[in-house]
Image (cartoon, rainbow, N blue to C red):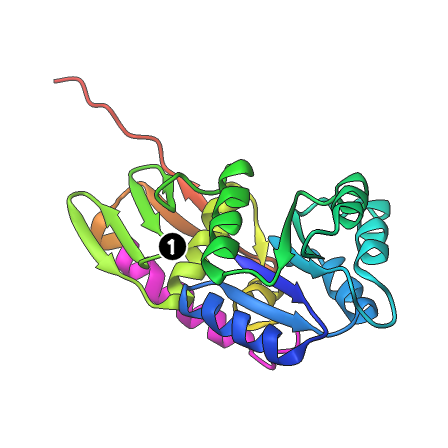
Amino acid sequence: MKILYVEDEKYMARAVAQVLRKNNYSVDLAYDGESGLDLAVSGIYDIVILDIMLPKLDGIGVLREMRKRSVLIPVILLTAKGETEDKVKGLDSGADDYLAKPFQTEELMARLRALGRRRGQFTADNVLCYGDIELNYNTLDLFGNGQTFHLTLKESQLLELLITNKGQAITTETIIEKLWGWNSDTEDSHVQVQVAFLRKKLSLITKRVKIKTVRGIGYMLTLDEEVIIDV
């Protein structure tokens, strides 16, 4: 899951981002409303954590502009403790949840998991299923055919992206932005390497789930139907 965290308190933003990354989330940071909005409308994020009090453009303004542009990704709004008006205004403007500052990172992660389940991305155990495989994005474990493989973080993020967009071609550019960040200088060859590694592990536990190369575009996850042979 790729998260955009918009927070002008840089120390707090970096500290929270570090905790989230240790829990295998991919996080980009923005420190003001204008840059946060530019990133939020890029389409590469799964959830936005958005502080209300921001320079240049406040969080409510960012949220309203996102919804105006039909950017429907979930938003967790960070409000001042006890500010009911901010909570009401945020929810009315299109926020999916709110969290009062200061907050515990454990509560933030619980709310992230809840939003992921609400979108149908994860089960209660943080497991993604497709065909005859299961991916636990929290532990980075891949299960199938009675076997378990521990993936690298990038392999897990790539498989997560492919499963949540199953049957759709994902561009190489989108993969780079999701896995390495929008301002990364990562090249297409890095994606090819990660795909090759993941394909090899998938081939050891399943014959049904495959990563298909879509020429000129990128990659997609496909599911071969089981062949039943009458004896």
Is residue 188 positioned above or below 82 on the image? below
Name of the residue lying farthest toward the top: 230
Query: Circle 1 sits on which residue?
Result: 137
- Do we see residue 69 in this rendering? yes
Locate residue 93: give its quadrant.
top right
The verdict on residue 214 being magenta is no
39 sits to left or right of 173: right
Give the quadrant of the C terminus.
top left
Front-lying residue, 100 or 168: 100
x then y, percent, for residue 16: 53, 70
Residue drawn at (34%, 43%), measured in percent from left and top? 125
Q: Which residues are magenta?
A: 182-202
Q: Tag 1: Cα neighbours inside 10 Å, few (<14), some, or many (≥20)? A: many
174 sits to left or right of 205: right
The verdict on residue 200 being magenta is yes
Front-lying residue, 212 or 115: 115
Which secondary structure type mostly characterizes the magenta part of the structure? helix
Residue drawn at (42%, 55%), measured in percent from left and top? 159
Locate residue 223: give its quadrant.
top left
Q: Amino acid at mark 1?
A: Tyr
x then y, percent, for residue 158: 45, 59
Is residue 12 positioned above or below 100 on the image? below
Front-lying residue, 14 or 120: 14
- Do we see residue 213 in this rendering? no
Residue drawn at (38%, 54%), measured in percent from left and top? 137
x then y, percent, for residue 121: 49, 42
124 sits to left or right of 175: left
x then y, percent, for residue 58: 83, 62
